[in-house]
Amino acid sequence: QVQLVESGGGLVHPGGSLRLSCAASGFILPDYVIGWFRQAPGMEREGVSCVSSSDGSTYYADSVKGRFTISRDKVKNTVYLQMDNLKPEDTAIYYCATDLEGRLGLDKREYDYWGRGTQVTVSS
């Protein structure tokens, strides 16, 4: 059974940092993609970043380029999202998801399984 569990959310001041983790289990495939998405109250869920399991290729939304870094630990089957220089507009529930067909992109319709999310709040 595919399972994704997010952790690492919390309350941080503007300009601060957080590192989110996404622990994946229940599947063994040579090529898949893990993505991070976020959803603020009253807003559509939007893609943030994703990484390929096979070669580590990454993709970022323009809104987070230069501030967020995605990485993977293949041994632990965990993906991280390092978020620096956080802004109040980054406040949202952050979800990780997996595309088992290995397509690198942030179209949420292509993602098959989702975690339950972790809250990130950026406020002074």
Image (tube, rainbow, N blue to C red):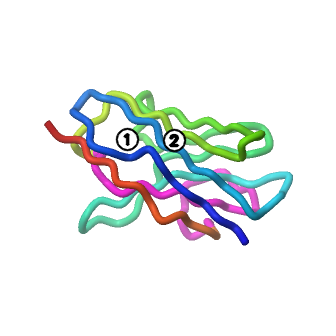
Q: Where residue 53 sits in the image (x, y, percent)?
A: 74, 45
Q: Tag 2, which secondary structure?
A: strand
Tag 2: Cα neighbours inside 10 Å, few (<14), some, or many (≥20)?
many
Question: In terms of image quadrants, where is residue 26?
Answer: bottom right
Query: Residue at left 18%, top 41%?
Result: 123
- The residue to which callout 2 is attached is 60
- Number of callouts in the render? 2
Q: Where residue 3 sits in the image (x, y, percent)?
A: 64, 65
Q: Tag 1, which secondary structure?
A: loop
| Above or below: residue 16 compared with residue 33 | above
Q: Where residue 15 sits in the image (x, y, percent)?
A: 26, 27
Stretch in magenta: 90-111
Question: In terms of image quadrants, where is residue 29?
Answer: bottom right
Question: Is 85 within the magenta?
Answer: no
Report whether 16 appears left or right of 108. left
| Above or below: residue 4 compared with residue 17 | below
Tag 1: amino acid:
Ser
Question: Is 104 within the magenta?
Answer: yes
Tag 1: Cα neighbours inside 10 Å, few (<14), some, or many (≥20)?
few
In this view, the residue in front, 121 or 76, is 76
In this view, the residue in front, 37 or 117, is 117
Q: Where residue 118 sits in the image (x, y, percent)?
A: 41, 55
- The residue to which callout 1 is attached is 63
- In this view, the residue farthest toward the left is 124
In this view, the residue in front, 56 or 120, is 120
Tag 2: amino acid:
Tyr
Q: Kindly indicate whether the residue at mark 2 contacts the one at mark 1 (C-beta within 8 angstroms).
A: no
Report whether 50 appears left or right of 61. right
Question: In terms of image quadrants, where is residue 57?
Answer: top right
Query: Residue at left 48%, top 49%?
Result: 7
